[in-house]
Image (cartoon, rainbow, N blue to C red):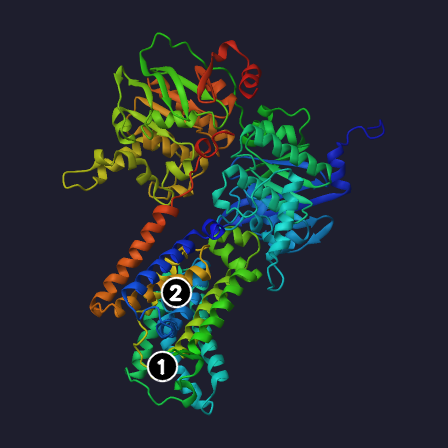
Amino acid sequence: MRNLLRSHPTEARLLVVLVALCAGLGIGSDQFLTLGNAASLLNNSSVNLIWAVGLLVVLIAGGIDISFAVAASVVQYLCVYAFAGLGGGNWLIGFLVAGALGAGLGFVNAGLIHGFRVISIVITIATFNAYFGLLMFFTSGRFLYDLPGWWSRRIIIVEHQSADGRWAELTLPVAVMLVCVIATWALINRTSTGRQLYAFGDNPEGARRAGVKVATMQFIAFGWCGMMAGIGGLMQVNITREVVPNALIGRELDVLAAVVLGGARLGGGRGSVLGCVLGVMLVAITQNGLNLLGVSPYAFKMIVGATILIAISTASLRFGRAPVRGHGTARKGH
Amino acid sequence: MTAAEPAADPAERTATESPALRLAHVSKLFGGVRALDDVAFALGRGEVHCLAGENGCGKSTLIKIVTGVHAPEPGAEIEIFGQPVTSVTPTLARGLGIAVIWQDLALFPEMTVAENIAFDTLVGGRPRGVNYRAMRGLAAGVLDRLGVGLDLDARLNTLPIADRQIVAIARALAGDARLIFMDEPTASLTQSETDSLLAIVRALSARGVAIVFVSHRLAEVLEIASRVTVLRDGRLVGVYPTAGMTQSRLTELMTGRQFSHAVRARDLAAERAVLVLDGLARRGEFEGIGLTIRAGEIVGLTGLIGSGRTELAHAVFGLTRPDAGTIRLDGRALELRSNRDAVAAGIAYVPEDRLALGLIQPQSIADNIVLSVLPGITGGAGLISEPARAGVVGHWLRELAIRIGRPSDPVSTLSGGNQQRVVLAKWLATKPRLLILDSPTVGVDVGAREGIFAIIRDLAAQGLAILLISDEVPEVYFNADRVLHMAGGRLVGEYDPRQITLAELEERIYA
């Protein structure tokens, strides 16, 4: 723990806050600390977690992506037609098509950012609008319910019956989320490409001089984020069993806030998968707890917003202080 | 050397017989500007060679071409360890044994020491797994060879600048470099750190590693290098052995001008005292400081980094509060609660780290100059008066002979010397009584330094009291009326440049 505190202060603090929150909610509500509630929390957070780790990679590489949630909606619609064209499809085809379409939309972002040398927030706000506009125009806002059976069927991975007879079930999106989280962790921590992404986000010019290929970094970061957007979109349909064009718009900001809460820095070079997961879960558990405590749903956004503000501002009070610069003060005693 | 081969310089012979690097007909255009014009350059294995020239002479461009950051114009010949190379990429250059320690370090502040040192093993080739154990091993090995101990797992941004410099050197050595470019490696080091760096350079050279050394500190250059290549305005001036070369001759070659070095100290004991410090102290920084600066006087304050010079300046400028003692300006005792009070009282301070603290780089030259006097040029409605602004800007551009395109250009487009003048203008616009200059020539090339000192002497002649803080003893020796020596937070000596030689003064300060 002491090691974690030293090397990852943000993550350690989040963990402490999370444990305290869980303990408090456990006392406040007898339903919170049940297997069933934990399972439904995971089921409901899996899509956000998939998106969060995708976005994390972009943030680490020094960019930002506003368009991924809308891109996920685009992928959902395209998937419906693609599966129909491919004779109904199956899970394998589903993952390949959704992942590839998502990555493709991410590559569009990367291509525009690198090609025009425009900062990513501007490009992805533009593509956010373009994707959403195209989607609404071509679908006329129509919902789709007629989906292949394999796609909308609930798949239970693990189940457990408690003594009181209630079931706790983990569904497919949780398993997919775990794979995405572990894959992202491996990418950014265990591959040369991942370390180059960190370096590129940290000091772009230094990375360039070291021979890091700038365009490759952009395509990998935004492609990965897009792929996660697509896979998350696929899972979202598995949960809700419908495709709604404006269902996901707005989710990008929730995810972004949770990822930044987890210690990723706007500006690049910093962020971890652990922090990212903790950030998403802190927001999810806060909402879950408010629900169980019977707080009005109208107050949710306000309280979640306040939670994020408090968490981020206290974190920067303790740890965000810039290291003391200048010779005299920093090196006194030499 | 035998009588049969009298003239051949040994270093030159190595360069021809077993060259580490040979360049010919290297040119580079940026837009319409010719940054390099048909330049040739060569050095032999194990040679320490200095690349000298003023800012903007093309040194950095040359290094960037050899390391593949920029491509030269067609027609350039590049030979690395005898192998002709048509197009250099950073990965290829590293593969051939070339490493660079960039002036701006080019390190990764959020990554650990070990990762920074071994970073180059992650780049190039196909994507692969990261072997942290091997990276740590490599980093530890290099630091060991350098004889320094650093925490391998510390994030780089938690280290002081000097340690980051060591990390940059270690990174260059990690790739088994046979040719290392060092671009201003000593700019942020103290004397003792510089000495150990020079020792490392000698050890590397003895092992056959060729080193191209770039530094503004000419004494260092002449001490460490065997030959020096001088560039001016993108053209080759010549290649000279350092044996028999003097600093003033080298300055002449770099600038194409002659400078007279003479002690300019005057006796101003009869003048009115402007600043009087008495018993000034701040816990852990400095104590018992008593000094007087008279109208028109330039007082040099020198001493090693960490001696408390900058801290003293901060206290006089109201950035920190002294624990004891008094600050009097024009006979009035000052109680400074912030630097705004100091500015209002007539104190101006040009900080050491000009780029970070003194200027707002992306903003225009004009906006930077008026930054300190905004209330004075604001009209009735709370809006900035355009004629008043233009008046202030125009006055100081003329007064300080700042060479610029337009006042609306960003400050970042100016050379180091001209940026320093903009900082001066910003503070002079507040009409100060006392001007504190902290290391005003760091990062400013030799020719421009003279210009800045000419301005400083002019200002003194107009009656301004000036405290000139500098690392470089010659700078205070030749420009100040009195030299104060600070060590361990105390004033330990006062010298009159007319009664001591430069060598004696340097010995007392570096002893």
- The residue type indicated by label 1 comes to Gly
Q: Is residue A302 left or right of residue A40?
A: left
Q: Position of residue A225 (x, y in %)?
A: 44, 68
Q: Position of residue B5 (x, y in %)?
A: 82, 30
Q: Position of residue A137 (x, y in %)?
A: 30, 80
Residue at the extreme bottom: A87
**Camera-nearest residue between A209 and A13:** A13
Label 2, residues with CA under 10 Å away: few <14, some 14-19, many ≥20: many
Q: Is residue B25 left or right of residue A97?
A: right
**Camera-nearest residue between B385 and B304:** B304
When asked about the image quadrant of residue A76, the answer is bottom left
Q: Residue at x 40, y 43 (%)?
A: A322
Q: Are the residues under marks 1 and 2 on the same chain? A: yes
**Camera-nearest residue between B49 and B72:** B49
User: Would you name the residue on which mark 2 appears?
Assistant: A65
Q: Is residue B87 above or below residue A172?
A: above
Q: CA distance from mark 1 to mark 2?
A: 44 Å
| Residue B74 shows up from this direction | no
Counting residues from the N terminus, which is met first, the one under dot 1 or under dot 2? Answer: 2
Q: Is residue B123 above or below residue A244?
A: above
**Camera-nearest residue between B48 and B284:** B284
Disc assigned to residue B355: none
SS category of the residue bearing label 1: loop
Chain letter belonging to callout 1? A
For marks 1 and 2, give the one nearer the viewer: 1
User: Would you name the residue on which mark 1 appears?
Assistant: A165
Q: Position of residue B446 (x, y in %)?
A: 51, 29
Chain letter belonging to callout 2? A
- The residue type indicated by label 2 comes to Asp
Residue at the extreme left: B380
Q: How many marks?
A: 2
